[in-house]
Structure formats: C-alpha cells, structure tokens
Image: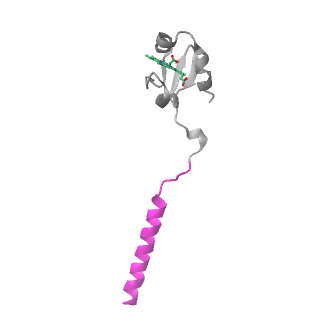
C-alpha cells in the first residue's frame, strides 16, 4: 500500500513539473515588436502601430512599395511619416 502511494505521489509531481515546463514565457523583448515594413518614396517605414489607428484604415500591404497608394491620398507630404521611419 505504501509503495502505491509513493508511486502516485511521484506521478502527481511529474505531472506538475510537465505543466509548469509547458507554460509559455510571458517575457517579450522590445526588439520583438510587430513589424510591418513598407517603402514610401525610397524610405522604409514600420507602420505596424499605424495599422490600428490610421484614419484611412488598415490599407497596408507589408513588405511592398506603397508610394503610389500614399501619394494618391496624401500627395507628397512625407513629413507625417517621419515618426514611423524604420531603424533596424
Ligand atoms: C502607404 C499608404 C499610407 C500611409 C503610410 C498613410 C499614413 C498616414 C498617416 C501617418 C496619417 C496621420 C495619422 C494621424 O495623424 O494620426 C494619415 C492620415 C490619414 N490617412 Fe493615410 N496613409 C496612407 C494611405 C492612405 C489612403 C490610401 C487613404 C484613403 C484612401 C488614407 C486616408 C487617411 C485619412 C483620411 C487620414 C486623416 C486625415 C488626413 O490626415 O488627411 N491614407 N495617413
């Protein structure tokens, strides 16, 4: 009877160890921020944050040159984009 109890205790402990080991890490380094890079007029911008706040909606196609899309609405006013300039 004592042996069976010890075996159950060991099984229970190993189950706890397995559950704890499978927990995904909550830590996220700042370098792992979301990226959505677009090119406008030869400059690369990260518009990841802009996707949810842009008054014109989430029109972004990451990893493409969107100069014409930008110009069609905003003309050549690139100043508003400067805060999104991508610095790797
Ligand atoms: C690559 C494409 C585009 C980029 C990077 C871009 C970026 C921006 C940025 C940075 C702002 C200022 C946001 C703020 O002040 O919080 C803005 C505003 C706005 N965008 Fe865009 N935009 C793009 C294309 C478009 C298109 C195609 C439309 C509509 C068809 C549009 C509609 C608007 C509107 C309505 C506003 C707010 C009013 C204004 O500033 O004119 N955008 N956009």
Residue 69 shown left or right of residue 85 in the figure: left
Q: Quadrant of residue 84?
A: top right
**Residue at coordinates 40% horizontally, 80% vertically from top-left?**
7
Q: Residue at x 47, y 10 (%)?
A: 72
- Does 46 sit above or below residue 68? below
Q: In the rendered view, does 62 fall on the left or right side of 45?
A: left
**What residue is shown at x 48% (from left), y 63% (from top)?**
20
Position of the N terminus by quadrant: bottom left
- The secondary structure that dominates the magenta segment is helix
Q: Is residue 31 left or right of residue 66?
A: right
- Applied colour scheme: one colour
Q: Where residue 53 sits: x, y (%)?
A: 49, 29
Check residue 18 for magenta coloring.
yes
Q: Residue furthest bottom?
A: 1
For the residue pair 60 and 64, the one nearer the viewer reads as 60
As rendered, which of 40 and 74 lies closer to the eye?
74
Q: Which percent across, then down, holds residue 47? A: 52, 27
Front position in the image: 56 or 1: 56
Locate residue 56, reporting x and y percent. 45, 21
* Residue located 50% across and 11% down the image: 71
Magenta residues span 1-27
């Amino acid at each position: 009877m004592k042996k069976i109890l010890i075996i159950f205790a060991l099984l229970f402990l190993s189950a706890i160890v397995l559950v704890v080991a499978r927990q995904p890490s909550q830590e996220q380094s700042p370098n792992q921020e979301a990226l959505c890079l677009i090119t406008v007029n030869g400059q690369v911008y990260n518009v990841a944050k802009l996707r949810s706040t842009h008054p014109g909606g989430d029109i972004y196609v990451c990893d493409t040159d969107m100069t014409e899309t930008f110009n069609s609405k905003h003309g050549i006013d690139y100043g508003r984009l400067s805060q999104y300039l991508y610095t790797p």
